[in-house]
Amino acid sequence: PKVESISSAQIPDGEIDAVTGILTDAAFGSEYKLDSGLKLSAWGRFIYQFTDSSAAANDGQNITWKDAWLKAKYSALNTQIGGNALSVSTELRYYLPTSKASRLDDTIGKVQVRINPSLEFGKSPFSLGAVTKLNYIIQSQETNAKGAALGRYEVYAGPQANYRLSDNVTAFVLYEAVQMWDNKGFSASSKNPNQSLTDLEPGLEIQATKNLTIAPFL
């Protein structure tokens, strides 16, 4: 929920003035690791809704499947620059049209390329990282059933600064920016002067156990 209404049954949805109910977002997958640093995996994702988008209602429980994807990740690019450790991982993903939204739009699929650099400054507790994504959505038609233009390209950049407080706790600040294009040019949200396409997220990454990380953020 929004900070000013923490007991609300709805949360912002990322679209303009849109809300949804309280939910969990879960992904599960199977991975095969090659000796070369290349990992191949297949993933599924679903949303479990606890409440519906009405602020007063709490009976909207349901499961919504999102697009599944196939992923190839290469993370063996490591080097030293002036005593600082630089690593870069790259990903190639193909999203299958398994969600209801993709099926309604007759979307063929989505290709995504990710380049994720990380820089550690010697023995300093400071480090920098980033997630960058380029999406190309393969559409079978120009518009949806309502005549609205369908998304075609999306560029995302998420640089992040980190400070290691202890062996198990790291504070971070993430800045996100995204730009979208549809079949008619810039997407509608990009033209809306009241819609921000950036945000700032401070948070903590807590290594609770060897296999469990908790990362609350605002």
Image (cartoon, rainbow, N blue to C red):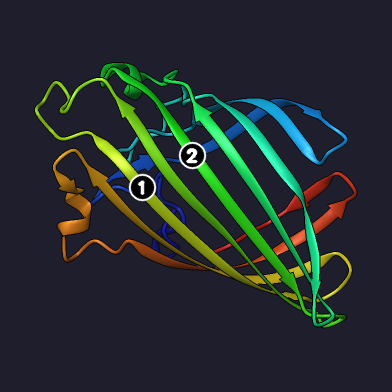
Question: Gap in Å between the C-alphas at discs 2 and 1?
Answer: 9 Å
Q: Quadrant of residue 71?
A: top right
Residue at image point 90% right, 48% down: 210
Q: Label 2, secondary structure: give it.
A: strand
In the rendered image, which residue does mark 2 sit on? Answer: 112
Q: Amino acid at mark 1?
A: Glu
Quadrant of the image occupied by residue 127? bottom right
Can you give x and y, in whole percent of width and height, for residue 10 in the image?
38, 45
Q: Is residue 109 left or right of residue 114?
A: left
User: Is residue 55 visible to the viewer in this orientation of the structure?
Assistant: no
Q: Measured from the top left, where is residue 25 in percent x and y? A: 55, 36
Q: Which residue is located at x 17 percent, y 47 percent?
A: 185
Left/right of residue 43 with respect to residue 63 in the rendered view: right
Identify which residue is drawn at 27% across, 38% down: 151
In the picture shown, does residue 176 fall above or below 74?
below
Residue 57 lies, with reference to residue 214, above or below; the image says above
For residue 198, the mark is: none
Amino acid, disc 2: Gln
The residue under the point 55% across, 67% down is 159
- Residue 74: give x, y in percent of width and height: 72, 43
The crowd level at tag 1 (other Cα within 10 Å; few <14, some 14-19, many 20+) is some
* Earlier sequence position, callout 2 versus callout 1: 2
Q: Which residue is label 1 attached to? A: 154
Q: Position of residue 134 (x, y in %)?
A: 44, 47
Task: Please indicate whether residue 147 sits to the left or right of residue 62 in the image.
Answer: left
